[in-house]
Amino acid sequence: MMFASLPGAVVEDGVLLHVGNPLTEQRALEAGSAVAPLGDRRVLGVPGEDRLTWLDSLSSQALARLQPGESSELLILDPQGHVEHAASVVDDGETTWLIADRADAESLLSWLLKMRFRLRVAPAARDDLVVIGGTSAAVAALGADVVWRDPWPGVSVGGWGYADAADHPGRDWAEAIVSADHLEEIVDAASPGAIAGTVAADALRIAAWRPRIADVDERTLPHELDWMRTAVHLDKGCYRGQETVAKVHNLGHPPRRIIALTLDGVVPAPGDEVRAGEVVVGAVTSAAMHHEDGPIALAVVRRNAPVDADLVVDTADGPIAAAQHVIVPPEAGATASVPRIPKLGRRA
């Protein structure tokens, strides 16, 4: 078993959740003294001469001129502009590599295979490859040939941020694609505390306000999760869902918006309702225990939910108070004058 050499390792369905103390693992990941095997990710390889122009035509991102080693991110939208799939993207000059959440990867691959037509592309799942995450420096030390560097929270070329990137919590994150054998060697040779689990990695992701497919439901538009900044190119050619993306951005406002929550008490569960007074305004999408902030969460609420209200989250253990931090403001849109939003507060 790959993680048998790690004392205290908790593994579920092949995914290393933690090695005994997720809070300590978060600190190690932030400090660059640990890396996290991301068994909740899956690697798809897309070789072929037409790969970049093909992915460009299908997705929300401009990829036709993606340079070897350059990192990006794409979304696959339905005809109404709702998010169906998401993937991190990096090209090595011969193959375009997609890193997708394991829960989404199979359906993403199935859809890509249906869209090949006569083009010179050959998308396939690469189950011989795995993903390891950490700070840019920690991941670079692994010596991997293919590394995706998260552009978040910067605004990519052609993207749009509904709040200034300087107002977002910092994010130094990269993911290396390595062989399963190489991962086993890394784990076996690791010093104590040098390996972290996915629970720690996801807590840091939530603290950075970073969306994943876990935050998506059947109605999600990219604007609602602030995904316009890294996953959408507003000036590229036609793709499925583009009309809705442009209309909501240029002529209206996203009907819902993502917020960050710091909570008193327990960590809520995805799907727990968020209330302003007695009115349900949304639901939690992701939650975690953070090593500094305690219980934190991302939630999607109605656009008109009051930005200055004290919210309540209804958990299995009862209602708990939640302080909200605006990510996508209610007036978000191309013509909005977006105020600077305070960073996520740190508890004393």
Image (tube, rainbow, N blue to C red):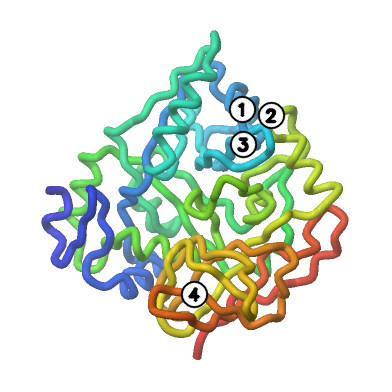
**Nearer mark to the viewer, of 3 and 1:** 3
**Cα–Cα gap, marks 3 and 1:** 9 Å
**Cα–Cα gap, marks 1 and 2:** 6 Å
**Cα–Cα gap, marks 2 and 4:** 39 Å
Q: Is residue 179 above or below residue 94?
A: below
Residue at the spot of label 2: 239
Amino acid carrying mark 1 in the image: Leu
Residue at the spot of label 4: 314
Q: Are marks 2 and 3 in contact (CB under 8 Å)?
A: yes
Instruction: State left or right for residue 60 relative to residue 348.
Output: right
Residue count near mark 3 (Cα–Cα under 10 Å), binned few <14, some 14–19, many ≥20: many
Residue at the spot of label 1: 58
Q: Is residue 227 above or below residue 244?
A: below
Amino acid carrying mark 2 in the image: Tyr
Residue 145 is drawn in which quadrant?
top left
N-term-proximal mark, 3 vs 1: 1
- Residue positioned 79% across, 70% down in the render: 339
Residue 59 place in picture, x, y as percent: 62, 32
